[in-house]
Amino acid sequence: PRWNVVCNNIVTSSGHELPWVENMRYLGICIISSHIFRCSLDHAKRSYYRSLNAIFGKIGRNASEEVVLQVVSIRCIPILMYDLMEECFLTQSDIRSLDFSANRFLMKLFETVNTEIIKECRDYFNFRLPSIMLVERRKKFVFNYANCINSICELFHD
């Protein structure tokens, strides 16, 4: 409950002050200050769009849609999903934002804004939205955790 209280800066033994910040990057993940553990998606989305534009800049419309979708699935979607750890709390608006980013790419690729056409294209090319991938990753995480046999996991099973 005291996550937003102003505190004195921490002073190191050499006299340097460590200021309190609203967000920080650790191992490529942007952690933001909140009453629960939260991650910011802004950096991931910027990197995702940057990689998409790089792919479109190189191959443009010369390659088939199937090839472009395969390259994007292998190269760009992992960038978007990188900081979405299984235990990171995402709001519904965060999840919708991720899906929107993927759908905007499909709208650009297929040159349409019709959501029904985009849905059919996703189904036809088996292109999964980030929200679906998150559910699958969480299920896999929970399954692996439940089947983990070591002394640390045993402490938390009971």
Image: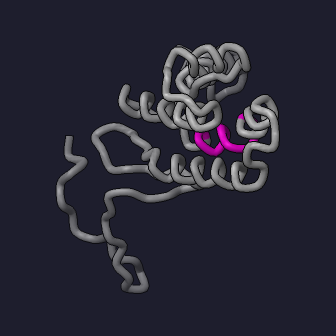
Residue at 57% across, 18% down = 117
Question: Which color scheme is applied?
Answer: one colour
Residue 101: % across, % down: 51, 37
Residue 14: % across, % down: 43, 85
Residue 54: % across, % down: 69, 55
Residue 154 visible in rendering: no
**Which secondary structure type mostly characterizes the magenta part of the structure?**
helix
Q: Is residue 79 magenta?
A: yes
- Left or right, 143 with respect to 116, comes to right
Quarter in which the N terminus is drawn:
top left
Residue 35 visible in rendering: yes
Q: Nearer the viewer, residue 82 or 73?
A: 73
- What segment carries the magenta color? 73-81
Q: Is residue 114 magenta?
A: no
> Residue 118 falls in which quadrant of the image?
top right
Residue at 70% across, 55% down = 57
Q: Nearer the viewer, residue 102 or 21?
A: 102
| Above/below status of 68 relative to 134 | below
Residue at 58% across, 24% down = 129
> Residue 21 falls in which quadrant of the image?
bottom left
